[in-house]
Image (cartoon, rainbow, N blue to C red):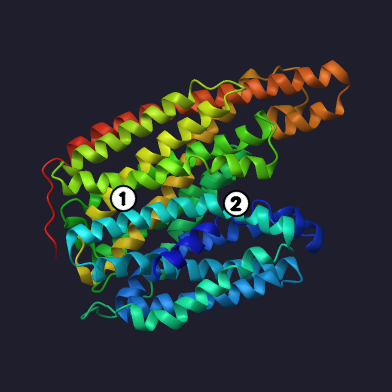
Amino acid sequence: MLMLPLLLVSMDVSVLYFAIPAISADLQPSGTQQLWIFDIYAFVLAGLLMTMGSLGDRIGRRKLLLIGAAAFGVASLTAAYANSAETLIAARAVLGIGGATLMPSTMALIRTMFTDPGQRAKAIGMWSGVMTAGIALGSVMSGVLVQYFWWGSVFLVNLPAMALLLVLGPFLLPESRDPAPGRFDWPSVPLSMAAVLPVVYGLKEIPSEGWHAQYVVSITVGLLFAALFVHRQRTATNPMISPALFRGAGFAPSVVLNLIASFAMLGSAFFTTQYLQSVLDKSAMEAALWALLPSVPIGMAAPMATVLVQRGVNRAYVVTAGFAIGAAGYALLALADTDSLWLVLTACGVLASGIVMVISQITDLAMSSAPVERAGSASSLMETGAEFGGALGMAVLGSIGTALYRHEIPASAPDAAHETLGGALAVAAQLPGRTGDALATTAREAFTSGMQGAAIAGAVLLAGAAVLAARALRGIHVADK
């Protein structure tokens, strides 16, 4: 029951990848509206995670889960039959609100339902695997549905699962809440959103638009509000996020390592999706289907890590090994050239397997170290850190790759060719004969060089994270609370 909403929330991150052309033809959104159709879901989700995690601790995690499921279902129905871009944007925003209630609630309920540490570790491993697989599955599912039905079908698939959750959830899921939560800290709600949204916005725009002043200012403003939010949590009588969470053994290191893991995972996705489509010239559907292959080892990584820890292997060693495996994946990616399909898929599988090992173990550590009454807040902090990490990974590694790409493109090439690989290929298609072919070949080689440089940076980062994990987690043993 808990995996159903989690799968759908993660799928909705990528479910529009193949549906947007059909949406554009039907609703005719402006360029700005099309960007908001894509981005509003992730922005609202990231901005409300901490609020909803804390709210679930107060009113009950099952209650919040069911409220979120109802909102998600209604918003899905509205999005499916939207007759304007404005309606679709509003529906996607409500989907983000629903997603922000569902994600921390599922993890918090796992924390309270599975009191046996071994069983909880397995459940959290499944949670991590489903979360990762959902993002990959969403794009493929949207391609299949749009090919055989209309674009609204990508939203209607949410309805049966949400209906099932609303019917069976009250019977199968126990309620849990903080028995003495205190008053809800309303001033922290706008502060948390003002801290998260500008930073995520700036980081998401930098890979494609560059380090323009407006994005740097956006990130700076968000960091200033983050400082105010932290001050509020340290001084308020009943803070939204209790500072006591960070005094739990292993919680603070888990948040940091989770951010690094998300950095690595989404930072690589920025390149590999473009590589499959624009360098290897696969169609969107072909690229999505090839991208499913790395999911096979990913499905085994988290259970294997859990088994190792339960058989007595120190968790610090398992997390360190996960980061080392991820670094090896990046190292393989650095060896790719313009015709390395299997090498790139292998690199993605190795990288993602290592990262899922890390995420499953540090999530279990964080949730085990957090008091049960603050399970929602603990889960929301981990997930907010993951949102920051993913956006930061795309910004930093994307910027490295873009800089190297632009360095490799000849100065005589048209301006559009200097911006992106897609722009270069569009220009090349309009040029005659060998001139267009030469530009396309140069652009693909330049992009691959950029991917290699970013992969080297990712490998160095994860090697450093392996050392950090070995030091930070050494000697940490968390008893069940």
Q: Secondary structure at mark 2?
A: helix
> Circle 1: is it few (<14), some (14-19), or many (20+) Cα within 10 Å?
many
Tell me the amino acid under the disc marked 2: Ser
Q: Can residue 323 be seen at all in this image of the molecule?
A: yes
Rounded to the nearest whole Å, what is the CA distance between mark 1 and mark 2? Answer: 23 Å
> Circle 2: is it few (<14), some (14-19), or many (20+) Cα within 10 Å?
many
* Image: 334 above or below 41: above
Tell me the amino acid under the disc marked 1: Ser
For the N terminus, give its image quadrant.
bottom left
Q: Secondary structure at mark 1?
A: helix
In the picture, measured across the screen, residue 280 lies left or right of residue 300, that is right
Q: State which quadrant residue 23 falls in.
A: bottom right
* Image: 213 above or below 42: above
Where residue 71 appears, x then y in whole percent?
53, 77
How many badges with numbers are in the image?
A: 2
Please tell me which residue lies in front, 392 or 343: 343
Residue at (47% x, 44% y) in the render: 295
Where residue 65 appears, x then y in whole percent?
41, 75
* Image: 406 above or below 360: above
Where residue 130 appears, x then y in whole percent?
42, 56
In the picture of the structure, the residue carrying the numbered disc 1 is 360
Where residue 41 appears, x then y in whole percent?
56, 61
Residue at (50% x, 70% y) in the render: 97
Please tell me which residue lies in front, 166 or 404: 166
Please tell me which residue lies in front, 53 or 321: 321
In the picture of the structure, the residue carrying the numbered disc 2 is 139
Please give the label number shown on residue 242. none
Q: State which quadrant residue 425 falls in.
A: top right
For the C terminus, give its image quadrant.
bottom left
